[in-house]
Image (cartoon, rainbow, N blue to C red):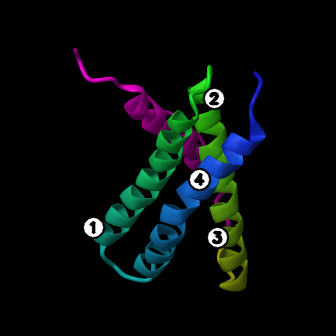
Amino acid sequence: MDLDLAVVVRAAGYSLCWLVPAALLNLLASNTDSALLKFVTFCLILLGFAFGGFAVVRFRLTNPLQHAAAAALLAFVVIQAAGILVAIGRDRSINVIGIVFTALLAACTGMLGALLGLRRPAT
């Protein structure tokens, strides 16, 4: 697999433009009892990963799905690193299985965003 790191970093940056506010909203929602609010903010986070995958398609690569997954994972690592620091600061436990699951979900959602970007209208 030959990844163009500049494309991955740019797409992850595009993704982070959406993810940072969504993650902050998710952090605020985690302090409430509203399961709906937590779900909505989690969906906003998934949309951020999909947006990074969608951004990869602009670069006209031969392997956009791999780049989309890598961009989503890079954005996830940045957001998750901040989340881990917040959890340590709040003296909360860190769920490693949840982190791995969410990383896989981020990669899949990034690829879904790329697939949506690759769709061409019927002619």
Observer able to see residue 100: no
Residue beneath disc 2: 66
What SS does tag 3 mark? helix
Sequence-first disc among 1 and 3: 1
Q: Start and end of the magenta stretch?
A: 94-123
- The quadrant in which residue 60 appears is top right
Rendered location of residue 23, percent (x, y)? 51, 69
Task: Report if residue 63 is visible in the image.
Answer: yes
Going by the numbered disc 3, the residue's amino acid type is Gly
Please give the residue where the numbered disc 3 appears in the rendered image: 83
Residue located at (76% from left, 21% from top): 1
Rounded to the nearest angstrom, the CA distance separating label 1 from label 3 is 21 Å
Q: Which residue is mark 4?
A: 98
Q: Which element type, helix, strand or loop, lies under badge 1?
A: helix
Left or right of residue 33, residue 52 in this image: right
**Quarter of the image where the C terminus is located:** top left
Q: Earlier in the sequence, mark 1 or mark 4?
A: 1
User: Whole-Å distance between the Cαs marked 4 and 3?
Assistant: 12 Å
Q: Is residue 116 above or below residue 24?
A: above
Mark 1 lies on residue: 36
Q: Label 2 is placed on what type of residue?
A: Gln
Which numbered circle lies on residue 55? none
Q: Which amino acid, by three-letter code, is at mark 4?
A: Gly
Q: CA distance from mark 3 to mark 2?
A: 25 Å
Label 2 environment density (alpha carbons within 10 Å; few <14, some 14–19, many ≥20): many
